[in-house]
Amino acid sequence: MLLGHFDTVWPLGALAGMPFRVEGGRAFGPGVLDMKAAIVMMIFALRALREAQASHRPVIIFLDTDEEVGSACSRPITEAIARECEAVLVLEPGQGSQGFLKTSRKGVGDFMIRAQGRASHAGVDFEKGQSAIVELSRQILEVIKFVDISRGITVNPGVIHGGTRSNVVAAEAWASVDIRVARMADAPELEQKFAGLRPFNPQCKLEVTGGLNRPPMERTAGTVRLLQIAQGLAKELGMELGESATGGGSDGNFTSALGIPTLDGLGAVGEGAHAANESIVLEELPRRTAILAGLIESI
């Protein structure tokens, strides 16, 4: 299975501000690294194998359109296809300027914490109010205690909102919290901690929803075997291919969690994914495509 996605983080109209261009050995444009170039690589790798009349397993390409927003619709399809495959090759961009392959990724989730208090006039009836903002602030200080860097567990309150005006004791407030885990075994404990949150102020109400929505891609023997094949192919081309772990998630998280050997980061080499300087190194494309073709033939 060759796995990738069509969608990007860029909105309609982005080309007007950052048009596609080739300059200094690089191609620039929205989504060119993450991951339009990889789709081109898939096409040319299979074309090369066909022209060489190489024998290999049947290949299924699956490109979804909602990876950047969580893969909610495509996940069941991804998993169904992967179950029928010997291996999954994910063409997300290589890691860093050296294009390291990715053998592990963190699992990703989110929680919504909503606090409900009681509104009152901040000057006239201050004591009658119960601030949802104060309650939420105390909850945020509580959840950041769940961070355990040594175990690869992070908790990030990324968006907060609350209140209506500065002279009103806030009746409502909420926070969106990102969570990451390196091991699936740590997810239930973290989810239980969120489920165990209780109001500090008994006059306020608290609602906590969410959980892990993308399991971690853990480094397995099957993934290492794919890595070693790729590294051997790279050496034949005079290249050194390293491996890396990353905190970001991909659709490879889903296939790896099913126990199917999954190797990620086989796509283009460049910089600026999701940023205005998004670009790929053009001279790396044929070499990375050759490695991809060799992997398909070798598995």
Image (cartoon, grey):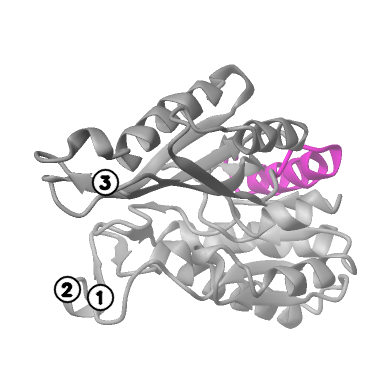
Between residue 76 and residue 62, name the one nearer to us: 76
Q: Earlier in the sequence, mark 3 or mark 2?
A: 2
State the extent of the magenta-drawn residues as a range.
217-243
Question: Looking at the image, which residue is at 22% across and 76% down?
Answer: 19
User: Where on the picture, by quarter, is residue 250?
Assistant: bottom right
Q: Is residue 240 visible?
A: no
Q: CA distance from mark 1 to mark 3?
A: 37 Å
Compared across the picture, whether 142 is left or right of 169 comes to right
Label 1 is placed on what type of residue? Ala
- Tell which tag, 1 or 3, sits nearer the viewer: 3
Question: Looking at the image, which residue is at 32% across and 33% down?
Answer: 134
Q: Which residue is mark 3?
A: 170
State yes or no: discs 1 and 2 in contact (Cβ < 8 Å): yes
Residue 72 drawn above or below residue 108: below
Compared across the picture, whether 106 is left or right of 24 comes to right
Circle number at residue 17 = 2
Q: CA distance from mark 3 to mark 2?
A: 40 Å
